[in-house]
Amino acid sequence: MHITLLDWGIIVGVLLINLAIALSFASKAGKSLEDFFLSGRKLPWYIAGVSMVATTFAADTPLAVTEIVNKQGISGNWLWWNFLIGGLLTTFFFAKLWRRAGVVTELEFINIRYSGISAKILRVFKVFYHGLFMNAIIIGWVNLAFISILQVFFDLPKEEALLYTGGVMLFVAIYSSLSGLWGVVLNDVVQFFIAMFGCIILAYFVLASEDIGGVDGLVQKLPEGSLNFFPTLGDSLQGNATILTLSIGSFLAYACFQWWATWYPGAEPGGGGYIAQRMMSAKDEKNAVWATLFFQIAHYCIRPWPWIIVGLCTIVLYPELGADEKRLGYIMTIKEFMPPGYRGLLLVGLFAAYMSTISTQLNWGASYVVNDFYKPFIDKLASGKKQVAISRITTIVLMLFSLAVTTQMDSISGVWQFIIECGAGLGLVLILRWYWWRINAWTEIAATILPFVAFFIAQQMDLVFPNSFFFVLSITTIGWLIVAFVSPATDEETLDKFIQKVKPSGSWGRRASINQGKLRYAFLSWGSSVIMVYSILFGMGKLIFKDWMMALIFLAVACVAFTILRYAMQREEALEV
């Protein structure tokens, strides 16, 4: 494909902006671990929120949505739409608690919530499991998508595309190691708006093409069932096209279980990973809540529609693509429909989406290694500057390790399935550890390991999703409940300090209940926000496809839900201890 001088100028210009931002914050990030990994806990809600959205906008995401829409129509997005329920649970039940905990990483939370040798084992285990192993897998699947983009865009062999991916990744590792989270989040803001604008422009050009003929033409040419927001059983046929819909079992797994039961990066029940990192980086508890709420709205309501539109168009434009090639339809539309200049803008948008995810994953992974392994177990007396220096070296090492893992991977969808099912059952423990005294470190260890055992058994029994998911969830839940009641509880002194510091609601044994009265308003905030965000999501879809009456109804419901949400948030704040 021909890339003009204007296209290259846009690409180089954005990369130079990224580097300039990193250099300007290098000295600020070098003061301490809190500055390097949490931006000194000074982020306003809009910066922290946009950074969350940018991080989840990886290079693989538009391709993944294109594949989902090709195979299952709009309703296939319930694969990830279901996580909204858990995300809003995090917003109203956990954002304040994370900020109040005063920890540098999610794993440091283990140190203030649990006690004994089991707490140390869990903390070290998660450094290597989440910070290295899972982090490298996540980076690997993002790399695979980026490699696919380079292959299709520039007609490169896979080996050469991998080499260029390594070069871009090295650039990201350098600016991440220089500026820490300060540079990461500010680059996220720049990268998000570039990537979002590029996606909107692509949707416009593809939709306006003669092959599609606008919204009306698209609706007429799509197979029946493509525009359904909710799944139906069986196949919907139109000519030679087939839209495969979700089974009832799969829909129930997504809508009723997955959002609270499964650990999934970026959608951890109760918050975790880089989402917890952004909440802990907010300048106060209120900013942590608003950042997380903004993230949920932007992530589910604003961002996906340009991808969904292009995905629907690829059903019409490229019916010849095989099941394993449908995600490439997104890149093919860029080559075919984007004019020079705009083409470079969208390409740099995909670069930006890739870099924002990689920079966060590297910074987050390094925070685990340094704050939760090096600092407490290797060199407790290391100065702040030495810890930052080790953090920068760790960022580069993690980049090299993740690139090596990438060379051993060949399937994005296979990685998704592995992570979803091998995290089934852990989610409820991550929620209850904030609200129930009986959850201890052994419980969390069991809930982390048992899904792998159950998943292996499910594979031997030839179980497939959703049956395999329900099997893993059942075995894991029964297992960790047994461990919770037979293993020693966290010692009284640790629990007392935790409660005094974090002030959680819930059941804490002999201790007096704290903030119990505000729980009803937290539930009201959660319920009304779920209705509000889904209503905005569906209302925007109805507007796009010119179903004016349903759009008006959905948006009216969203307004009512928002009014209830504001009331509940104000009442809860008034009751806060």
Image (tube, rainbow, N blue to C red):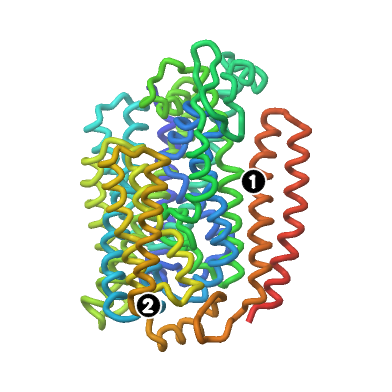
Within 10 Å of the Cα at label 2, are there few (<14), some (14-19), or many (20+) other Cα atoms?
many
> Could you say which is closer to the camera, residue 310 or residue 490?
490
Q: Residue at x 49, y 63 (%)?
A: 270
Q: Which quarter of the figure has residue 414? A: top left
Residue 142 appears in the figure: no
The quadrant of the rendering that contains the N terminus is top left
- Left or right of 332 in this view: 518: right
Residue 75 image position (x, y, % from top left): 56, 34
Give percent across and percent down for residue 145.
Answer: 36, 37
The alpha-carbon separation of the residues under discs 1 and 2 comes to 37 Å
Q: Total number of numbered labels?
A: 2
Looking at the rendered structure, the secondary structure element under dot 2 is loop
Question: Residue 114, labelled with which disc?
Answer: 2
Q: Nearer the viewer, mark 1 or mark 2?
A: 2
Residue 534: numbered disc = 1
Q: Which image quadrant for residue 516?
A: bottom right
> Is residue 547 rendered to the left or right of residue 457?
right
Is 145 or 8 nearer to us in this picture?
145
Q: Residue at x 37, y 32 (%)?
A: 149
Farthest residue to the top: give it. 239
Point out residue 342 in the picture as x, y percentages from the top left corner: 51, 30
The residue at the point 50 percent across, 50 percent down is 257
Q: Split into 4 quadrants, where in the image is the C terminus?
A: bottom right
Q: Earlier in the sequence, mark 1 or mark 2?
A: 2
Tell me the residue at 44%/31% (across/down).
7
- Tell me: residue 547, above or below residue 140: above
* Residue 155 image position (x, y, % from top left): 31, 24
Q: Amino acid at mark 1?
A: Tyr
Q: Dot 1 lies on which element?
A: helix
